[in-house]
Amino acid sequence: MVVAFLLIFFGVRSYRDNVAGGTVGFGRAFAVAALISLVASICYVATWEVIYWKLAPDFGTKYQAHLLDKVRKNGESGEAIATRCRT
């Protein structure tokens, strides 16, 4: 999170220095920061959509099977496993 906030800070500072002539008001700085956050969020979501649908479409099923194997190896009863799966 600190890195993300620093990138927004440096983005707004770059906008101020290179585009706005050295000064920028709060509203314009807020808008630039919001747009930087929006672009970063769109890239983040698009990346996870590609990973989920193309690279690992069965991740949820495999992870659930892994967790069930793990609790079975720990010796939990079938009732405890069923309770855990419902929540």
Image (cartoon, grey):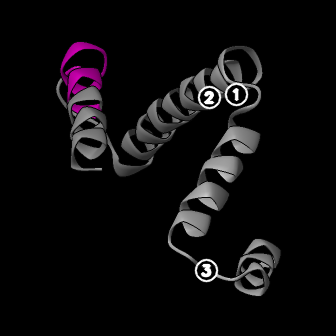
Assign a secondary structure to mark 1: helix
Residue labelled with disc 1 = 52
**Image marks 1 and 2: residues in contact by CB distance under 8 Å:** yes
Which of pointers 3 and 2 lies earlier in the amino acid sequence? 2
Q: Position of residue 78 (x, y in %)?
A: 76, 79
| Amino acid on which disc 2 is placed | Trp
The circle on residue 48 is 2
Question: Label 1 near label 3: C-beta < 8 Å?
Answer: no
Horizontal and vertical percent for residue 86? 82, 77
Q: Residue 63 at x, y = what percent?
A: 64, 46
Which quadrant holds residue 56?
top right
Q: Write the start and end of the magenta stretch as one range.
A: 12-21
Q: Residue at x 29, y 23 (%)?
A: 15
Tell me the amino acid under the disc marked 1.
Tyr
Residue at figure coordinates x 69%, y 83% from the top left: 77
- Circle 2 SS class: helix
